[in-house]
Image (spheres, rainbow, N blue to C red):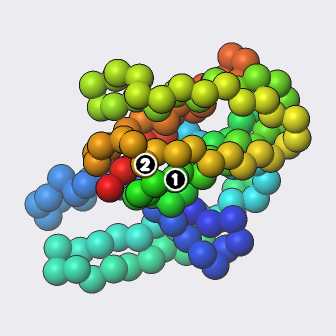
Amino acid sequence: TRSSDGQNFSTVGTVVSSGGNTQTAYSFEDNNIPLGTSYYRLAQVDKDGGTHLSKIVTLVRRKAGIYVDRFPNPAKNTLTVTVQGESNGNIHVLVADMQGRPVLQQQWQKTQQQMNKTINIGALQSGIYQLSITSGTEKQVLSFVKY
């Protein structure tokens, strides 16, 4: 899980257990780390539903680039997209279904470090979609659920 304030955490990925009683190494890479300070912790969920939280680890990202987030997820009629980064200019937005077919495309103009835009997804059928944000040579891809 990741947090921007060290208090409110949200899931950024899940790794499923391989099962068994042997010691196994697991890994997960967060490819969409926001600029600034982020707080991480692991949440281990046992088969019986019990949860164990790790110590909180702090990471500071100073590298230029873009950070993209979306909320709510799942979403019903609108999806708010946050694009953060030092570079400004044209942003290409593409929403594709799970077969890779484009279902929505937009062009945005980013003029400040952080930009929030709302996409109307009310006409989309329920399902899982890929949100692709391209700024210059950098591209971020996130999934979201439409219900």
Residue in view at x 70 percent, y 42 percent: 83
Q: Is residue 71 left or right of residue 36?
A: left
* Mark seen at residue 1: none
Q: CA distance from mark 1 to mark 2?
A: 7 Å
The answer to whether residue 44 is above or below residue 114 is below
How far from the left and from the top, in percent, is residue 103? 41, 28
Residues at marks 1 and 2 touching, judged by CB atoms closer than 8 Å: yes
Residue in view at x 16 percent, y 80 percent: 48
One can see residue 64 in this view: no
* Mark seen at residue 122: 2
Circle 1: residue type: Thr
| Residue sitting farthest toward the top | 137
Res. 37 image quadrant = bottom right
Res. 47 image quadrant = bottom left
Residue in view at x 48 percent, y 73 percent: 54
Circle 2: residue type: Gly
* Mark seen at residue 78: 1
Q: Is residue 12 left or right of residue 68?
A: left
How far from the left and from the top, in percent, is residue 118? 62, 48
Q: Quadrant of the C terminus?
A: bottom left
| Secondary-structure class at tag 2 | loop
Q: Is residue 51 left or right of residue 57?
A: left
How far from the left and from the top, in percent, is residue 91? 70, 26
Tell which of 87 and 76 is nearer to you.
76
Res. 137 image quadrant = top right
Residue in view at x 23 percent, y 74 percent: 46
| Secondary-structure class at tag 1 | strand
Tell which of 129 and 40 is nearer to you.
129
